[in-house]
Amino acid sequence: MDRFFKLKENGTSVRVEMMAGLTTFMTMAYILAVNPLILGAAGMDWMSIFLATAIAAGVMTVAMGLFVNFPVALAPGMGLNAYFAAVVVSSNGAISWQMALTAVFMSGIIFIILTVTKVRQLLLVAVPDTLKHAITVGIGLFITVVGLKNSGLMTIVLEPFTDVPAHSGRPALGAETVLTMGSFHDPNVQLAIIGILLIGILLVLRIKGAILFGILGTTIIGYFMGLVDLASLGKATWLPDFSKLEFAQFDFAGVFNVGIISIIATFTFVELFDTFGTLVGTANRAGFMKNRQEGNKRVGKAMMVDAVGVSAGALVGTSTVTAFVESSAGVAEGGRTGLTSVTTGACFLLALFLAPIAALIPGSAASAALIVVGVLMMQSVKEIEFQDLVQGIPAFLTIVFMPFTYNIANGISMGIIAYVILATVGGGNKYKVHWLMWILFVLVLARYLFIGGE
């Protein structure tokens, strides 16, 4: 094991690596409870999503450890799972979850091609850092809105139009309120508030696995509030029923008939920057980038495993699988090699036998976790120089369009358009617009002017 993972060379041991892997699992295990609830809104079966989440996270994280020797874990990503569900729900039946899974699978194939051809690295250079940080912040607000809606903390006053074509609804008048606060008499709202405060307290106290323990604690409180039925455990089957797995449920004909190219592009685009930030950040924290050539080589291999994970996750029935930023928790505990990832992956595979417990977790507890994760993603806002309006205006548009139009693609598109124009007109010698940004600019304009903003 020492020779395979190069433990001594990296100044670590089996015990340190396994404890680091367990720490990483504890910090990201909440996805096992949250992902089925989010994707369930798209009409998917809870058990099939739970199985897919555990299998995809377990297998791809073990692969990261064995093939790359990199202490990074993968699982269905927050934000993109919410976008997945929002695409299906907001389409009023035009887009099925099978089509959405197909879009994720195709984005993974594109991702693999971009990685092999080195275009992926070129995109990372072309898009300015300010937009990368803004995308993270915008997704954080997007999943916060999802959490507020699902918990009942935020309600809608004007019922959405059901039979009106997209973009043809009546504009809201100045005196109208579209969104408002939920009722504090609703026990689900009460539990969500308790969950937010409990997870917040655990984070402030720097408890390892704060989000997971917060969800479990909120679930226990929910039992005393009559929102959790423990009787179901007595009738539960603890052995995983793999017959419920939605394997290769693709609808390629439906995708091309509906025309959701922009959705495929959004999955690809967001995953591109999300993964880059996580892998490079983790590599820096682990000290791999001291030797930049070796560090870049390792990150490049990790990108390939991550790219394969996107399509593999869709194959077993879940939304985009990506590198998790929570992996830094394991690195902070001393994880330096792939043994950390193998340990984390093994924990996810063992979790296949804990489905009955995960099924008890109420939606309010998961919603509280979504809102708090939004807070953590919001931290990237400090990296944006709003005083420099060439950066500030595109970043602001990227951030606000995501939650307010309930569409991640709209935020990215507005940011690209604004940045290219402002950097060209007022950037002077300070800002050089990469030629690839001009291609993205044209594609975005074509999307809205000729294809439509779906």
Image (tube, rainbow, N blue to C red):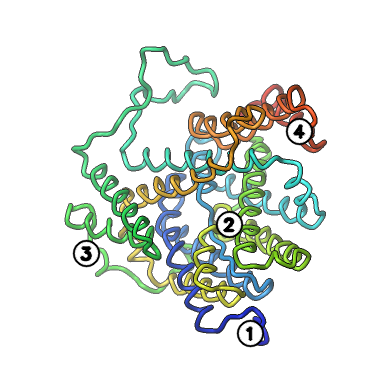
Question: In this rendering, which labeled residue sits more in front, label 2 or label 1?
Answer: 1
Query: What type is the residue that disc 4 sits on?
Result: Tyr
Tell me which amino acid carries mark 2. Val
Disc 1 crowd, CA 10 A, few/some/many (<14, 14-19, 20+): few
Q: Is residue 318 above or below residue 131?
A: below
Label placed on residue 148: none
Q: Which residue is mark 3?
A: 231
Which SS class for mark 4?
loop
Q: Residue at 32% across / 52% down in the picture?
A: 365
Q: How many marks?
A: 4
Q: How far apart are labels 3 and 2 at the CA level?
A: 33 Å
Q: Residue at x 54, y 45 (%)?
A: 380
Q: Which residue is mark 4?
A: 431
Give the answer, above or below, for where 318 lies relative to 9: above
- Label 4–label 2 contact, CB within 8 A: no
Q: Please tell me which of labels 4 and 2 falls first in the chain.
A: 2
Which one is nearer the viewer's eye here, 254 or 427? Answer: 427
x then y, percent, for residue 243: 48, 66
Quadrant location of the N terminus?
Answer: bottom right
Q: Quadrant of the C terminus?
A: top right
Characterize the local packing of mark 2: few (<14), some (14-19) or many (20 or more) Cα atoms within 10 angstroms. Answer: many
Could you tell which of marks 4 and 3 lies nearer the N-terminus?
3
Which of the labelled discs sits on residue 8, or is there none? 1
Q: Does label 2 or label 1 sit earlier along the sequence?
A: 1
The label nearer to you, 3 versus 1, is: 1
Q: Position of residue 87 (x, y in %)?
A: 53, 38
